[in-house]
Amino acid sequence: MTAPPFEILHHGAVRGVTGSCHELRLVGPTVGPASAGQCPHECGPTEGQHPHECGPAGGQHPHECGPTGGQRPHQGGHTAEQRPHECGPTGGQRPHECGPAAGILIDCGLFQGAETSGEGADRDNLGIDFPVGHIRALVVTHVHIDHVGRVPYLLAAGFEGPIYCSLPSAILLPLVIEDALAVGATRDRKLIARTLERLKSQIRPLAYGKWARVDTGIGTGLEIRLQRAGHILGSAYVECRITTPNARHRVIFSGDLGAAHTPLLPEPEPPLGCHALVIESTYGDRRHEGRADRVRRLQRVIERALSNRGAVLIPAFSIGRTQELLYEIEEIIHARHDEPAARELPWNQLEVVVDSPLAAKFTRVYDRLKPFWDAEALQRVRAGRDPLSFEQVRTVNSHSDHLRVVEHLRKTRYPAIVIAASGMCAGGRIINYLKALIDDPVTDILFVGYQAAGTPGRAIQQYGPEGGWVELDGERFDIRAAIHTIGGYSAHADQADLLRFVTEMKRAPDTVRIVHGEAEAKETLQDELVRRLPSTNVMVPVVPSS
């Protein structure tokens, strides 16, 4: 059987949920003697060799599948002999060993928490440790830092191709990168300006649902199409249509799929089908509570704070989660106006503090991009409401104002909701609020998103209910605040959403590769998919420990 003209490689989001970076590598017709365009898999001293090649003795690929476990084989009866990098209808062959190669990257994100380099969980792995000379384009599914944080380093490594993304992401991406560089990489404003200028020159916005041709420079044709993913504003999953003289193949990269009933955004629609699917699995082992339940739980936390005159601290991503929270807090406050029982609590005194200049920028962009909102949100706007900038919202911009708000809440016990980054408490302004208020029993800390292993957020979530402690900026703080987690606010699809995305395709994939999740989530989702799609080869790529 002829090998497919493509393979899939993973440069991140295999061990866990961060550092998303996947490659669709296309291989042209077999050529004669190797040249500068030779397959970058070839072993040897050439600069373009595949970074994983030439590993263990005997020439075996260090990711090789077999009894030692290069990937977790599913239980559906297929053998597990293909490399976990590889994906195609044949399931095990390496395509066109010596043909010219071209690739596109799907995202290029930052590693965070315990998934960073071996130098420690406090050091982000920023390097580009794979060849980029054959990369023709980057496709950005959305602008969260774990999907775009390494883009400046990709540019520095020599990538000069187009960066495809949705229209909203084209506006948001430079803002995210500017903040990431200023906070974590350099204070050199001229360097930041040059990087942003180059980034903007390479961005190519695409409309949802429209095919766009990618110039591969080899005899294999490639078109891509973005479809709404419902994760954050501008998020997309990517359909790739690969054409050769003899066949056509379709590969889909899910990016991060949104949960059902995500505020402001329409739900993702499953694609018609594909040959190969790469899908996230952040919540592949659980189901979220419904929207009505999560709003009720959020209301109860706010009512507790109003009754105790304490603060609710919500660590949140500046983009996506912050806007969703504002949307539903506005809904709660608006509904209280008509309830006599609400008069027993000082709802009119409640301040909603958005302490993040970046979140304020993103919220203004969200306001500008109302055409991308869902029907419910637009109906609120038509009714004269402002779901993101209502009367009780206060934005904190300067650092001095931030410190004053922290001190005010510490001294006065004034009822307030504070939304601040970072979402995993790994940095940002939320840290000062935690240090000031985490030991106060009237404080509520509310987690509304995934907390990666090795982050302070995970430690607070795990040890807070037991009266434990957390280390912040090198200092231990006892946790006496009440700890809450509302899973329904995750912008990630849950198990039911993920299964629906795959099983409602009219043409089931030949191969599914499960990434972007912790081991239990990936394995649980794998088992569920194998049960529902017995003819599909469902695999979990694994990077062996060294």
Image (spheres, rainbow, N blue to C red):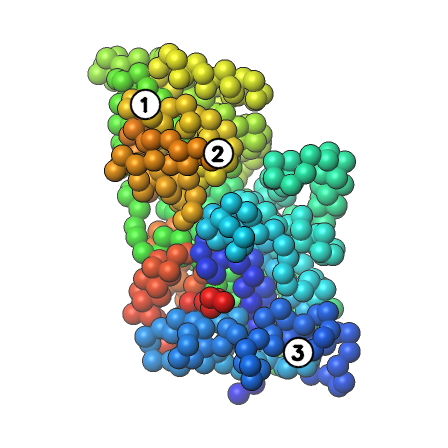
- In the picture, measured across the screen, residue 61 lies left or right of residue 324, that is right
Is residue 432 visible from the viewing direction of this image? Answer: yes
Q: What residue is shown with label 2?
A: 473
Q: Nearer the viewer, residue 12 or 105?
A: 12
Q: Secondary structure at mark 2?
A: loop
Q: Earlier in the sequence, mark 3 or mark 1?
A: 3
Q: What residue is shown with label 1?
A: 440
Q: Work out whether 67 lies above or below 476.
A: below
Q: Rounded to the nearest whole Å, what is the CA distance between mark 2 and mark 3? A: 45 Å
Q: Rounded to the nearest whole Å, what is the CA distance between mark 2 and mark 1? A: 19 Å
Q: What residue is shown with label 3?
A: 43
Q: Work out whether 316 lies above or below 137.
A: above
Q: Earlier in the sequence, mark 2 or mark 3?
A: 3
Seen at 31% across and 16% down, the residue is: 309
Of tags 2 and 3, which is closer to the observer?
A: 2
Q: Residue furthest front?
A: 475
Residue 406 shows which numbered tag? none
Amino acid at dot 3: Cys
Q: Secondary structure at mark 3?
A: loop
Mark 1 neighbour class, 10 Å CA radius: few under 14, some 14 to 19, many 20 or more: some
Amino acid at dot 1: Asp
Q: Residue furthest left?
A: 341
Q: Rounded to the nearest whole Å, what is the CA distance between mark 3 and mark 1? A: 60 Å
- In the picture, measured across the screen, residue 491 lies left or right of residue 24, that is left
